Image (cartoon, grey):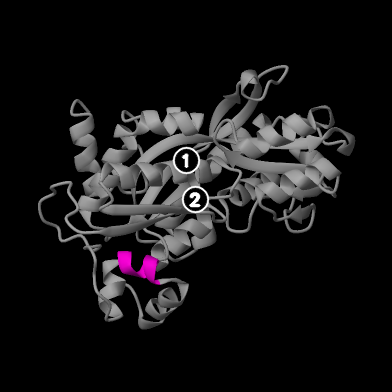
Amino acid sequence: MRMTDMRCATRVVAGFAALALTGAAATGCGGRQDAPSADSGGDITCEVSSDTRVSIATGNSTGVYFSLGNAYAEQVSAATDGRVKATAAETGASVQNIQQLVSGSYQLAFSLADTAADAVEGKAGFEGDKQPIQAISRIYPNYTQVIARKDSGIASVADMRGKRVSTGSPGSGTEVIANRLLESAGLNPASDVAAQRLDLTKTVDGMKDGSIDALFWSGGLPTPGITDLLTSARDEVAFVDISPQLAAMSEISPAYEEGVIPAATYQLPADVKTIVVPNLLLVRDDIDANLACVLTKTLFEKKPELEQVISAAKGINVETARDTEPVPLNRGAEYALDQLNPAK
């Protein structure tokens, strides 16, 4: 068990609901363990026999993580007749999600694949400290969406020198990508731009009122907050072409790939070239394999219901679900995927 007494005490303060789910913490604090969280290593039945609470770390309230996370939580609770009571919480996204997943504040977390790779390899924001996480599935891809006010004079990332630029919430995957894009264009994020480390809601407000010159956002399509911006200020903003940075970004991580934002997504005059990166659903590496199996099966069996809430869920594909390397795939998730797609 990795938890120290100090972590345990912190989680009691954070809330009993989160504490009760994580069996290792409940045992260490002297509380009752509602359901096993530590993987026993035994046979997988894909059944959860006792009441279990799952808290899901998502992202900004106007992003896809949050919308999909809430819909997914509802489907998990419904699919298990309430034996697994899932709830979703707004967070700062990827980096923060992984940190709080490992600490036990959450039991499931959304993350960009590049950030998750940094975590398991102990790189970048996790320098020298490999994180004990696994994936239950690769899900839809995130599209890097970079938008500037037309009156800012920004037509490329390099043009952001001296400008007020929102690089996303502190500890988010958006911030990681934003900083890497700025560096790939020869800019120092700490000194060459006036970085505004804001969530998407505040960023959109700043773009509308002119207090922010440009924004970075990594999210599914369409992202509600970006739709809001383009609906309210369509004649005042434009997408920035970041494709020249792809070669440098690919050297940092193979997770970065070329992508296109279709014009129809936001009723744009033309498609926009961009950089995409997959998303993963993460758990701690000691989660009960049966719970991981249930969570994975529900994700795919209830995909039609998720698509009705957020169209980005259409990018969840059982054929690519196992493609999570270098993040290990949880054995309970692998069992579920074998049942869902035995031909793999």
Q: Quadrant of the N terminus?
A: bottom left
Asked whether residue 184 is drawn in magenta, I would say: no
Instruction: Tell me what residue is drawn at x 36 percent, y 48 percent.
Output: 327
Say whether residue 193 is left or right of residue 254. right
Number of residue marks: 2
Say whether residue 91 is left or right of residue 109. right
Q: Provide the major secondary structure of the magenta segment.
A: helix
Q: Position of residue 34 (x, y in %)?
A: 24, 66
Give neighbour class at mark 2: few <14, some 14-19, many 20+ (Cα, 10 Å): many
> Is residue 117 something that shows in the picture?
no
Q: Are the residues tagged 2 and 1 within 8 Å (C-beta)?
A: yes
Q: Position of residue 12 (x, y in %)?
A: 41, 76
For residue 324, which quarter of the picture? top left
Q: Name the residue under label 1.
A: 68
Above/below status of 117 relative to 313: below
Q: Position of residue 333 (x, y in %)?
A: 26, 44
